[in-house]
Image (cartoon, coloured by chain):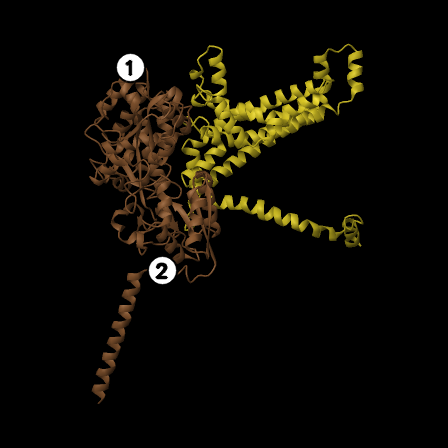
Amino acid sequence: MKKKKKAAAFNSLVFTKRMYLFLIPAMAFFLVFWIYPVLQLFYYSITNFNGINYDFDFVGLKNYSKVLSNGTLTNSLKNTLIYAVCTVALNNLIGLAIAMVLNTKLRAKGFFRTCAYFPALFSAIVVGFIWSYVYMPSQGMIASLINLFGGNGAAFNPLGNFRTALYAIALVEVWKGFGTSMIIYLAGLQTVDESLLEAGRIDGCTEWQLIRKIKLPLISSTITINVILAVIAGLKAFDYSFIMTNGGPGKSTKTLMFQVYETAFTDQKMGRASAFSVLAFAFIILVTVFMLYFLNKREVEL
Amino acid sequence: MNKKLTSLLLTGAMALSMASGAVVAHAEEEGYDHQAIENAGDITITMMVSGTATDNDFETEQLPALIKEKWPNVTLEVTKLPDDNYYTSLKTKLASGECPDIILTQPMYAGQNACYAMAEAGYLVPLNDMDSIKDRIDTMQAVTYDGDVVVATTGVSILGCYYNKDLFAEAGIESVPATWDEFLEACQKLQDAGIQPIVMGDKDQYVLQFGLYQIAANEIYPQNPDFDVQLRSGDTSFTDEGTWDKVLEMYKTLYDNKYIDASQSLGYGASQAITDFIDGKAAMTFDGSFNATALTAEGAAGAFERGYFPIPGTDGVYTATCLSAGESIYSGSKYIDECKELLDYWMDGESPVWDAYLATGRIIPTYGNGADSIPNYDLFKPFIDLLNEGKAFYWCNQAWPAGTETEMEVLFSEMVGGQGTEVEDIVEGMQDKFEDLLED
């Protein structure tokens, strides 16, 4: 009797057991192209595989202890966090500000929206090369402008300066990424009920109060999505370090992912790079989960 | 009768064994099957090299066409990838067993396609029996692993100092410096004349090797040619006094005196430095023979006369000249003999492929037709003369595990960038990295 009841509970008329068969292709792809490589990563992380010779040995947790003790993790983690904080903050502030402006009754706002989103259409490689020339000392675009106004363009060297290189490449990420944030914010702002804003205005709210008390709370879930996406992108930063500075000058723009690449392909320590990836993976997951928890809590409070 | 029969049989057996021995000896002498391509039918041979394809590119356009002309049954498919993509692609293809038949590899331990590492893993075919190699085996130590030549390389690559003869004359420098002190004196004269002495693209940190290896060729290897071999055995160290500390200190002098302006160079890429040189904005730049075409091109300063000399040492001049990268055959290839025949034709020193290869101006051949009439031969001659005098040493990173030079570049950049790094920190860092990389 009990068995029959249990079986009935699982026999849905809409989603029959046969339907599970349709999951198989997707699951197979997921297992082969995602789960299996991730498991392989854990496997290689306890070997001394060099990426070429498959006659390798197991070395236990030695790769992990090396990564934690040789200073590369500390340096790259510090650079990654600075990069992520800069890009998350600027991406969202600029994206939100422009979305708010472009959500008003503005003439040719379609054109301005397109312009703002335009940089997001280019690949990181193209953007990296373009900005390398923008930042170039003496003859770059900014240096030429400085020269034009009587300044010393030769002294402008953001990518060659240890203190500014990381911020300079973070700014490029912001330039390329704020358009995407803006589009998501714009979609969020368009869901805000006009009658609520109207009621606020009747009650004598200033424009800033409307933003703070009505718009921001109502788009809090959009803020969560944008911040989480930017945090993940920031922590996975690789493109501009690789294209524009190659990790330099010195080690000043070596991010977590760049360090993984360098360990794997330059040092030919694929095993150690795998251990590095596992640690980076754990760190990114931890930060993302924490941010998600914090922002969801904040959403409820708002 | 029995005895007669036995002796007859023995004689027959001996004759047979001698004949078969002769056949074996003959086969060994002949080497691989020299008719492999002719007997193969329609085949496609694949090849992958690194670099950037140009108009009428040798590897991707001229070579396949010339091979087709020689053997209509052969299609040569060439993929040319930028360096980093090449390394990644090569590893992926090796791992999947889908490696192209012919690949580009580098001497000794240099780079991620180092022939020693790949030969150790069993990926490369011995090439000793190739016609274009068997008479040169003695000169190919840097591409010989465990007694087998594994890279078909045709020439040498040079590191040196390109200079602008007009700017030298303007600063009153009459001859190429022959000692380190003369070199510093020349830099000072240029600076006093308001000319930037040297431009480097240190944002691409690998260019630091161009100057450092030349100084090492003067200051380390003449005193101890086995320095790097002894590094591996632990008999020498990067921290040994009067070796790498001296080299780094000498190169640092150029930055301390602003002969190379670190505030500029750390933000300059390698190609931007080349542009500055050909535009006449600096009198010298350290670079390799592989960039000769770009460095002799006409820039904003017009067609000024250029020269190329080895950076001198404290006691004379040696050159950092080494065997070039070359082509290897993948051990899993279905067409090993066909590839050998193809490479032999290419590198025989007289074929149309050889002529087209030389015309690229990228290689400095050590044999064959036109070896002394290649483009820029006058630029390279002083180096070739030093090579012939035995005053040449390989590029240091060829003897180090890949990654050691990166540590050197990073720490040197930190030093000239004012991060508080000292020469002692660099040599210690290099030694630590070297030991770490050798550990597994």
Which kind of residue does numbered mark 2 sit on? Answer: His
Q: Identify the hue of chain B.
A: brown
Q: CA–CA distance between discs 1 and 2?
A: 63 Å
| Percent x, y of residue A142 | 50, 18
* Neighbourhood count class around disc 2 (C-alpha, 10 Å): few under 14, some 14–19, many 20 upward: some
SS at mark 1 in the image: helix
Relative side of B306 to A258, left or right: left
Secondary structure at numbered mark 2? loop
What is the quadrant of the C terminus of chain B in the image? top left
Q: Position of residue A232 (x, y in %)?
A: 58, 31
Examine the rendered structure and indicate whether residue B244 appears above or below residue A48: above
Residue type at numbered disc 1 = Asp
Pointer 1 indicates a residue of which chain?
Answer: B
On the question of residue A248 being in view, the answer is: yes
Q: Nearer the viewer, mark 1 or mark 2?
A: 2
For label 1, the residue is B192
Q: Do callouts 1 and 2 mark residues in contact (Cβ within 8 Å)?
A: no
Q: Disc 2 designates what residue?
A: B34
Answer whether residue A45 is visible to the viewer in this image: no
Q: Position of residue A224 (x, y in %)?
A: 65, 27
Task: From the viewer's side, name the closer residue of B202 and B360.
Answer: B360
Tell me which chain appears yellow. A
Is B72 in front, or is A240? B72
The residue at 40%/38% (across/down) is A267
Mark toward the start of the polypeptide (1 vs 2): 2
Hey, which quadrant is residue B357 in on the image? Answer: top left
